[in-house]
Image (cartoon, rainbow, N blue to C red):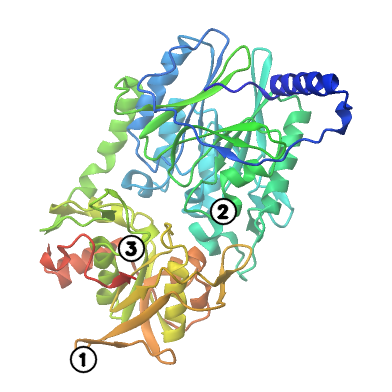
Amino acid sequence: MKIKSRLQKVVVTVLAVALMFGMSGLPVQTLQAADTTTTTQTTTPVSTEPANGVSKGDIVILYDNDVHCAVDGYASISSLKKDMKGKTKYVSVVSNGDFVQGATIGALSKGENIVKIMNKVGYDVVTLGNHEFDYQIKQLTALTKELKSKVVSCNFMNLKTNKPVYKGYTMKTYGDKKVAYVGITTPESITKSTPTYFQDKNGKYIYGFCSDTTGKALYQRVQKTVNEARKAGADYVVALAHLGTEGVESRWSSTSVIKNTTGIDVVLDGHSHSTIPEDFVDNKDGYQVVLSSTGTKFANIGELVIENDGDITTDLVPVKQYTKTDDTVKAYIDSIKEEYQAQISKVIGKTTVDLTTLDVTTNKRAVRSSETNLGDFCADALRNVLDADVAIMNGGGIRANIAKGDVTYNDLLSVFPWSNMGCVVEATGQQIKDALEMGARNYPEENGGFLQVSGMTYEINKSVPTSVKLDASGMFVSVGGQYRVQNVKVLNSKTGKYEDLDLAKTYKLAGINYTLKSCGDGYTMFKSNKILKDEVAVDNEILITYLTNNLKGVVGNEYANPAGQGRIVIK
């Protein structure tokens, strides 16, 4: 389906209205623009070929999102870029964030390898995803300086100056047309990365993302930036967004931003890993905005085409079906892989079962909404190696599966790619129950803060609506009503039996610094707790120790059930 440019739509609409109301004798000026703010779903299939209808003078914008270090796809998008340049000279490549994190090739270099590859491809504009902050602000600054593309994010703010850290938009000229690229980064970045990264040494926030409890702060910042771009002469405004459409805070979703702003023609989105070839969402004035997202890890390459006559289309090309690659970029990727392969390919143990983050019946990710055997394994490693009563591990921090067979250092580094640190704090039963409630608040929707556990079990009563109260940044404040988390039990290590959680009792709670010290995923309840073991080991090294020492090098049948050992029961 094609959508006309905003100017063309306005002219057509005004003429139609003028004719209709002119003939009826009613004054045209009495009409008010409808604010329908509805979403129209399309059934546009994913394309199996690049846009064959591209003509000379058309603008082609290739896009990705949530690549998460799936670097082989860069050779594909570079090849597609060359194909498109054979049809039109106006070709750009953009990214909607979350590119430097997600696998060993990114983790070992703290993102530098990924930036080098993107420079080889020749990206024009990128925006920042929440995972661009995972190596801290200093490293992000270094990476964006090395990156040859423009970096835009209108709402990543320096709170001391109240100005964006990066430019809110950048303008590119294609013949006689100007396209403004506006960057938007999810306000969830504070909780989805590490909150302390955005604070000074006294715990005061010095960076922010225009977050509040209504979404208005974000809408206003985006609108201000779009207005500036239009005033500067933009014929088209393309938002490079890392906001998401599902499993995210609704007030900060891409659809909410569209419905509460005007002047944007296209939103290319990321964050929720959604596959959206082409959808249409009405903006604040009732005009349709194109929305598209490519999935994740280069499952698809996105193509946005702005035709000479103003028609706008988006489509997705599956990388598995687009078999061409840029040999130069591929050779460069292979050379980087070779540099680190030897050190990470060492076998350190084996597993007799597949350890997974997935629901094996649907092949969809489950670790952010239910128990899995890999979630059990990770939580068990923290509890046993750190010698704690209980352990928690956020499902969003478990990033890869481990196939049955030999287990290498790379396998475990891929599961825990961020090198968080293991900690033990003294926590009350009430704080632990609050944490479980915080993690379960979005069920059945995914939540990166959903807690896998060890040394305890709990039930989630899905019929009980969440009463978790959050502040404007998504941080835990309190539970205002009935708990949906119920029947929490803790393992008595002496008797081997589970007993009711004592809300007044203190327990030794193991986890990672992200959750226990830095309020990651909004877990504020532990921030002032007594620290018993402070960052004593890197998380992936804890997995290695658990496998080699505690399990004697073999993951056995105790982890055979992909759905785990019945620690988390949904009622």
Q: Are marks 2 and 3 in contact (CB under 8 Å)?
A: no
Label 2 or label 1, whichever lies nearer to me, is 2
Which badge, 2 or 1, is on the more N-terminal residue?
2
Which residue type does callout 2 highlight?
A: Ser
Closest to the observer: 263 or 81? 263
Q: CA distance from mark 3 to mark 1?
A: 28 Å
Q: Are marks 3 and 1 in contact (CB under 8 Å)?
A: no
Reading the chain from its start, which is encountered first: label 3 or label 1?
Answer: 3
| Whole-number angstrom distance, CA of label 2 to CA of label 1 | 45 Å
In the picture, the quarter occupied by the C terminus is: bottom left
**Secondary element at tag 3:** loop
Question: In 3D space, how far apart are the residues under numbered discs 2 and 3 (Cα atoms)?
Answer: 21 Å
Q: Amino acid at mark 3?
A: Ser
* Residue 370 tag number: 3
Residue tagged by mark 2?
A: 250
Q: Vertical placement of 175 versus 473: above or below?
A: above
Q: Residues within 10 Å of mark 2 (few under 14, many from 20)?
A: some
| Residue 435, position as x, y percentages in the image | 45, 74
Q: Nearer the viewer, residue 468 or 397?
A: 468
In terms of sequence position, does the residue under pointer 2 or pointer 3 come before the other? 2
In the picture, measured across the screen, residue 510 lies left or right of residue 217, that is left
| Position of residue 462 measured from the top left corner of the image (x, y, whole percent) | 41, 68
Residue 443 appearing in the image? yes
Q: Amino acid at mark 1?
A: Lys
Is residue 428 among the parts visible in the rendering?
no
Which mark, by number, is residue 494? 1
Q: Position of residue 79 (x, y in %)?
A: 38, 20
Q: Quadrant of residue 176?
A: top right
Q: In the rendered image, which quarter is residue 308 located in?
A: top right
Q: What crowding class fits label 1: few (fewer than 14 Cα within 10 Å), some (14-19), or many (20 or more)?
A: few
Instruction: Determine the secondary structure under disc 1.
Output: loop
